[in-house]
Structures are given as structure tokens and as C-alpha cells.
Amino acid sequence: MIQNVTSLEMPVDEEFRIVKNHFSHGKGKRICIVTGTHGDELEGQYVCFLIAKMVNEHPSLLTGSVDIYPALNPLGIDTMQRGVPAFDLDMNRIFPGDSRGSMIEKVANDIYTDLLGADMVIDIHASNIFLREIPQMRISEQTANVLVPYAKMTGIDFIWVHQAATVLESTLAHSLNSKGTPCLVAEMGVGGRISHSMCQHLVDGIQNLMYNMGIWAVAPSADKIGESIVCEGADSVAFINAQTSGVFVTEMHNDMMVRLGQTIGHIIEPLTGKVLSEVLSPCEGLLFTIRAYPIVYEGSLLGRIYKM
């Protein structure tokens, strides 16, 4: 059932609307799938499609409620802009919003209020256009005891517990978690693109989470749910930054094991044909982030490695 979350009148007889698709069977728990906060992050669009398709095809297996919110920032998605067009705002920096505030603050508050009280919220993001990420959950240290067990149920590749996770107090996840509504933040892929395999992997994980929470009657096959790597501690991740400006070229992809001193790539200068710098791994471990956009400047993030 398509339901209105919030709506506001706009100029020229237009209406700004945020909607959700509500599926319900019985009096079981409620899970919410939220995405589209940033208009250039599209992985969640396909995840929402796959989950809606799953419920539509097997309604008898639903033993609770599923709410799907595919576009918290519909104007950003329509224009392929990260923030809210014309307002120059990052939607994920104004929660929980204000019912008496500006248009976007009111919208944020309506979304937040609609999600409050859910038994689980999955907030799906992609990376930006510059970086490619393996499927992961990002969890703050303050909520790790509650959220890590849920994240493990998804079998997602990587669970990153760190101080700055998700990142500011004005995010949707922090606002919900601080009020007792558990919210997991998923991140994967690269901005402006959809990875079918990553999305299906996350959907399998969400199905397994729903099964364990009593919202779905059937678990996915065991071979679809792996064991997550849990990364904890400020010193567990090594950051690779560009030493020079130029064009970063690499044959590496994320989800690869790398050795100490292994070549990750090179920064080159097209005009002269020179290699400006060789990018080496500072440690042994799992390369879970890799640069996707090749133009770099001194200090640009090129990759992240989980030390193993």
C-alpha cells in the first residue's frame, strides 16, 4: 500500500511528496528500508525494488511489516545531485528536523517521526563518485553492543565500528538510535551506479535479518549468508592518501587481500609520460575501499585497508 509520509505545496501547482510502500501481515515486528537520502547514491533503489518484488511474490511469507522508503530526497535523485537542489543542503545533516522549521527541516522531521518506533531501520547508502566500497555496515562505538549482532545476521562482508561512524549527530541513524529505534547504516558500491550483485547480496542479508527477527518465514539458503568481518578500534584501518597530484591508475579492486609494500597503483602525468609516484600498501590486510575517480590531488584518499 502506497502511503504519504509528507507532502508540501510547491510553486506552479506542483507538490513535493515523500512516499513509502507499506506491506503488512499479522502483528509482528516492523522493519523499514530507507534510501535516497543523497541523490547521487543509487544502489538502494535496486535494493528497494528487489525487496518489494520479494514481498509481492511471496506475501504469505511475511509475518510482520515492511516499509520501503526509496527516495528521502526525491529532488536530488531526479537531478542527480547529492544534496537537496536549490537549498544547498545535505539531507543527512538536518535530522531530526523541526516541525516548525523550514521546508526541508519539516520534511526531515516528518520522515524521522514516521520511522520512530520501528523494530529495525536499514539506511542504505552508496559511496560517492570518488570511492568504491565493499558492502559494509557502519556502526558507532556507542551503539555497537546493540547493533553489531543485528549486522552479523545480514552476513554483510564488513562491519566497521568506529568513533565517527555515520558521522554526525544530525544524521538519520544517530537521531533514531539515540531515541531507541535501532538503525543500521549500509554502504556499498560507488556513487551514480548500481551493482546488481552487491544489491542482491544485501537483500539476501536483509531477508536473513527479517527471518531472525520473526518478520519473514523463510531464511535464505545458507550459502548466501557469509560470516562478517568485524573491524573495531581506531588503529585497525590504514588510510592511503595521494602523495602527489595527477591521474591515479590501478588494476586493484576492493575486497582484495594486499601485502605490506605491495603496489596498489601509480599516479601519472599524461603530458610528460612520467610516473609521479608509486602507491604502496602500508600494511597487510583487506583493501575494502579503492579510488574510483582517477583525478587526484595531494592528500586525496586512494584507499582504506583493514589491518589483518
Image (cartoon, helix red, strand yellow):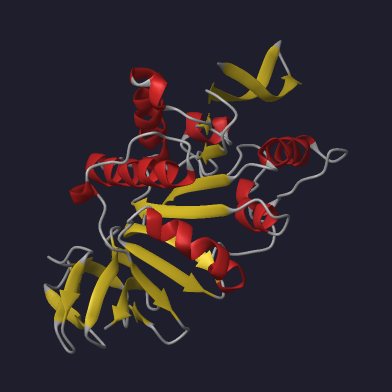
Tell me, yes or no, if residue 69 can be seen here: yes
Task: Tell me if 15 is positioned left or right of 145 in this view.
Answer: right
Residue in the foreground of this view, choosing between 101 and 204: 204
Give the quadrant of residue 207: top left
Q: Residue furthest right?
A: 100
Report the residue at 43% width, 58% height from top.
151
Q: Is residue 24 above or below residue 268?
A: above
Tell me, yes or no, if residue 128 can be seen here: no
Task: Tell me if 209 is positioned left or right of 142 in this view.
Answer: left
Task: Tell me if 115 is positioned left or right of 279 in this view.
Answer: right
Residue in the foreground of this view, choosing between 50 and 225: 225
Task: Tell me if 245 is positioned left or right of 9 in this view.
Answer: left
Question: Which percent across, then down, holds residue 178?
Answer: 71, 59
Report the residue at 41% width, 25% height from top.
52
Report the residue at 65% width, 50% height from top.
181
Question: Which percent across, then down, holds residue 155?
Answer: 32, 56
